[in-house]
């Protein structure tokens, strides 16, 4: 028996004014698989990810996450998504732990423990450190921890 795909993109198009950014994109990502999404700068990778997460709407086509149409049921679909698109933003003067707690509060979820999330991304012992002192790589890992915390708490 074949399981439903984690992500299903059908005939996806996105235009901004007269500029075609994504045209006729189709993709199926099976559950449990890891896919790399490669392309030149400006090829539409970020635009597709923003359509998957419902940050922007497609001009045509559909995006489903675990069988949920993102355009029709974005909130429901987002309960199954943890994402990090581009450079993560944080409250610079606050600690890593405080940033994660604030995120959980505005997402209205409990989450996994802060220490567990930081351990998962290789940031053990940095919870009290202000984000302003983090390198770009550390910020990206903290962004992944933030995505993990939201995703794992929704289960």
Image (spheres, rainbow, N blue to C red):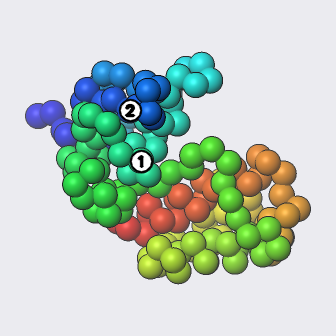
Say above or below: 131 vs 85.
below
Position of residue 63 measured from the top left corner of the image (x, y, whole percent): 28, 40
Q: Could you tell me which residue is drawn at 63 percent across and 44 percent down?
A: 86
| Other residues around mark 1 within 10 Å, as few (<14) / some (14–19) / many (≥20) | some
| Residue 155, quarter of the rendered image | bottom left
Position of residue 53 measured from the top left corner of the image (x, y, whole percent): 41, 49
Q: Could you tell me which residue is drawn at 83 percent across and 58 percent down?
A: 134
Q: What residue does disc 1 label?
A: 56
Label 1 vs 2, first from the N-terminus: 2
| Residue 23, quarter of the rendered image | top left
Position of residue 152 measured from the top left corner of the image (x, y, whole percent): 44, 63
The reply to whether residue 46 is visible in this rendering is yes
Q: Secondary structure at mark 1?
A: loop
Q: Secondary structure at mark 2?
A: strand
| Residue 124, quarter of the rendered image | bottom right
Q: Could you tell me which residue is drawn at 52 percent across and 65 percent down?
A: 149
| Other residues around mark 2 within 10 Å, as few (<14) / some (14–19) / many (≥20) | many
Whether label 1 touches label 2, CB < 8 Å: yes
| Furthest residue in direction right, as rendered | 133
Q: What residue does disc 2 label?
A: 14
Say above or below: 133 vs 44.
below
| Furthest residue in direction left, as rendered | 1
Q: Could you tell me which residue is drawn at 77 percent across and 46 percent down?
A: 137
The reply to whether residue 125 is visible in this rendering is no
Quadrant for the N terminus, please.
Answer: top left
Q: Which mark is residue 8?
A: none
Is 135 left or right of 24, judged from the image as shown? right
Of residues 126 and 28, the one drawn nearer to the viewer in this rendering = 28
Position of residue 67 measured from the top left corner of the image (x, y, whole percent): 20, 47
């Amino acid at each position: 028996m074949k399981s439903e795909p984690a992500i299903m993109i059908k005939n996806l198009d996105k235009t901004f004014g007269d500029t075609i950014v994504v045209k006729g994109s189709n993709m199926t990502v099976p559950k449990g698989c890891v896919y790399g999404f490669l392309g030149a700068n400006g090829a539409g990778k970020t635009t597709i990810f923003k359509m998957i997460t419902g940050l922007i709407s497609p001009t045509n086509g559909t995006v489903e996450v675990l069988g949920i149409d993102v355009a029709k049921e974005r909130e429901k679909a987002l309960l199954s998504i943890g994402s990090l698109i581009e450079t993560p933003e944080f409250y610079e003067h606050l600690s890593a732990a405080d940033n994660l707690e604030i995120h959980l509060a505005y997402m209205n979820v409990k989450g996994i423990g802060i220490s567990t999330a930081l351990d998962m991304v290789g940031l053990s012992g940095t919870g009290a450190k202000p984000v302003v002192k983090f390198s770009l790589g550390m910020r990206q890992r903290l962004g992944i921890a933030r995505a993990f915390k939201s995703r794992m708490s929704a289960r």
